[in-house]
Amino acid sequence: MKSYSKKTIKVIIKKEGIKIIALHFTDLSGHRREVCYLAGKIDDVFAGKVDFDGSSVKGFLKIDEGTLSLKPDLSTFRIDPWSTEPKFAIMISDVIDPTGKLYSKATRTILKKAIKHCQTLKLGSMFGVEMEFYFLKEEKGIYKLADTADYCEYPSTKHVFYKLLDKMEDFGIDSEPSIHEHGPSMYEIHFAPDNPLSLADKVFLFKDLTESLAEKEGLKACFMPKPFSGLPGNGMHIHVSMWKNGENIFFTKEGNKFSKKGFSFLAGVMEHTRALSPIFAPTLNSYKRLVPGFEAPCNICWGYDNRSTTFRISPISSAKNAKLEFRAPDMSCDPYLTFAGVIMSGLHGLDKKLTPPKETKGNVYKYTPEKMKKSKIKSLPIDLREALNELKKDKYLMNFFKDAG
């Protein structure tokens, strides 16, 4: 994201006539929350003097444990493009505990811890996402599909989509080729690769932007994992690569291939996928999406350019596009927690030099139970209860998340 100084933000506030600063943070469920403050008191905002009752946010503090505060990340400063009177700006904030340190239970803090662990290994990571969502219209109190277009067709809601892409650029969110998806009224936007913290911030800014635009256009933006039976669900496919000294360690120059280290990272994430499920698929509705037939994976396997597998390695032509696609996460997940879980799982694979199972070929959805058993392919949990039990059994991830908060 663009870097702003305190002085620059003050100048923008005065020039644009901004009256309110909305400080955003996330709770343990990945839901966005905000504390609003007068822009005229921006120095208090910069100093982290904006407090809130931590005991009123489920999972944070007990009623007798004190107050939490917010310290904004200046790089996330954005003016809401549709606010009029009063005009307001948004900043994503870190949650600060009573001792002045980053609050360990805040999900943004947890991702920062995973990134710091990478840095101790002299590694960096790059993430990209594909964000899927529906535009709906309301008729007599019922939300219905807003268009009937199919994959890459020319929809009646195209003008709203074009406005969204344009405003994303103004918001500093760089997108790659984006499309109307298979489902009617369903879209997919590809975010350009970025460091995981910045990209997670952009995911939340994008949701705000999309919801605001949809409301302005008389529509509803729907990010629910499976809003309609019989139609595709809303996934948040993750693309990840790991870098060291400016080089992608997932890339092997000889033959432009996915590297041995890349496969170890893949093996680590595969080993922990079932335990990661309540993080990347955190709602009851999430498991209605993870069923065969709608390009949502339900079996833990990998393949080259195979969209029926949970993990996909796309064609590699250079170091830039040597990456791993994780297709199971959905739009209800908290990107901070999900990215942290993927990073730590992959690092576990690198540390142990794990090897993934053999490539899965063909359409996995058509595999018989006998073939699945013979191929030793595990399935994702069938519901949230099973997923939570898997996480509880995973000592490696439980230790990380316990230590993180």
Image: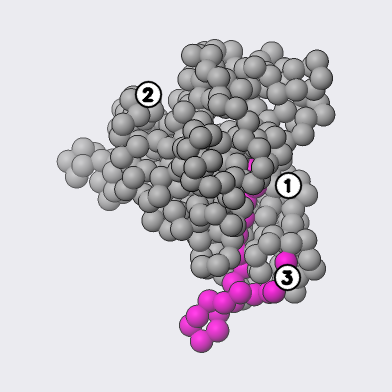
Magenta stretch, overall SS: strand
User: Does the image show residue 74?
Assistant: no
What residue type is disc 3 on? Ala
Figure label count: 3
Please provide the residue range marked out in magenta: 124-150
Label 1 and label 3: CA atoms lie apart by 22 Å
Asked if residue 230 is positioned above or below residue 323 in the image, the reply reads: below
The residue at which mark 2 appears reads as 396
Secondary element under disc 2, as helix, strand or loop, is helix
Residue drawn at x 45%, y 47% is 281
> Marks 1 and 3: CB-CB under 8 Å?
no
Where, quadrant-wise, is the N terminus in this rendering? top right
* First in residue order: circle 2 vs circle 1: 1
What residue type is disc 1 on? Ser
Q: Nearer the viewer, mark 2 or mark 1?
A: 2
> Is residue 300 or residue 368 the one in the foreground?
368
Where is residue 197, by image quadrant?
top right
* First in residue order: circle 1 vs circle 3: 3
> Marks 2 and 1: CB-CB under 8 Å?
no
The residue at which mark 1 appears reads as 175
The residue at which mark 3 appears reads as 149
Residue 162 falls inside the magenta stretch: no
Where, quadrant-wise, is the C terminus in this rendering? top left
x%, y% of residue 312? 65, 37
Q: Residue furthest left?
A: 64
